[in-house]
Image: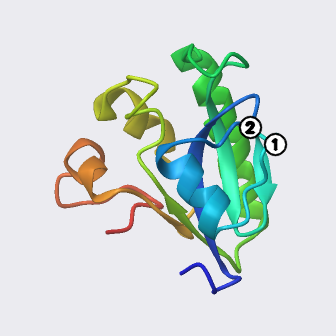
Amino acid sequence: MAGDAKVVFVFGSNLAGRHGAGAALWAKRFHGAVYGRGQGPEGHSYAIPTKDWDVYTPLSLERIKVNVEDFKDYARRHPGKTFQVTRIACGRAGYKDAQIAPMFLGAPINCKLPIEWKKILGDGRAPEGFQT
């Protein structure tokens, strides 16, 4: 996946762009995420802010939703790319899958969402954009 320019690794970030652990560190090491850039596309990755500038404080659900909407708009404008979305905000930011997954309803079909979200987002009829 790291070598395929058409696959974009989507991860949760802090606004300071300190990609020091978890999916953010993976994005920095293998997908071109840049230290100091905490939002948007870079290399073969896309950072969705889920934590504040101090890197410890989670953003509010409302703020994360705005950031997810920005990402979904970006994904719609880039239909030739596949976006591999991680369980953003469900690790170090401390939110539950059930709080974050619904933010991705209506994501374009080129977004592959985490399998853990399937039982939340679909009951045999996956919503638009849901991929296993």
Amino acid carrying label 1: it is Arg
Foreground residue, 6 or 102? Answer: 6
Left or right? Give the position of 130 relative to 14. left
Question: Whole-percent x and y of residue 77?
Answer: 79, 63
Foreground residue, 30 or 93? Answer: 30
How packed is label 2: few (under 14 Cα within 10 Å), some, or many (20 or more)?
Answer: many
Question: Whole-percent x and y of residue 101?
Answer: 39, 39
Asked if residue 20 is positioned above or below residue 59 in the image, the reply reads below
In the picture of the structure, the residue carrying the numbered disc 2 is: 17
User: What is the tally of numbered marks visible in this picture?
Assistant: 2
Say which residue appears at 67% left-offset and 81% top-offset: 6
Left or right? Give the position of 73 relative to 3. right
Asked if residue 106 is positioned above or below residue 50 in the image, the reply reads below
Question: Whole-percent x and y of residue 61?
Answer: 52, 18
Say which residue appears at 82% left-offset and 40% top-offset: 36
Tell me the SS state at disc 2: loop
Tell me the SS state at disc 1: loop
Say which residue appears at 63% left-offset and 86% top-offset: 3
Q: Earlier in the sequence, mark 1 or mark 2?
A: 2
Say which residue appears at 59% left-offset and 41% top-offset: 20
Label 1–label 2 contact, CB within 8 A: yes
In the picture of the structure, the residue carrying the numbered disc 1 is: 37
The answer, for residue 107, to whether it is visible in the render is no
Asked if residue 86 is positioned above or below residue 88 in the image, the reply reads below
Measured in 3D between alpha carbons, the distance from the residue under mark 1 to the one under mark 2, in whole angstroms, is: 4 Å
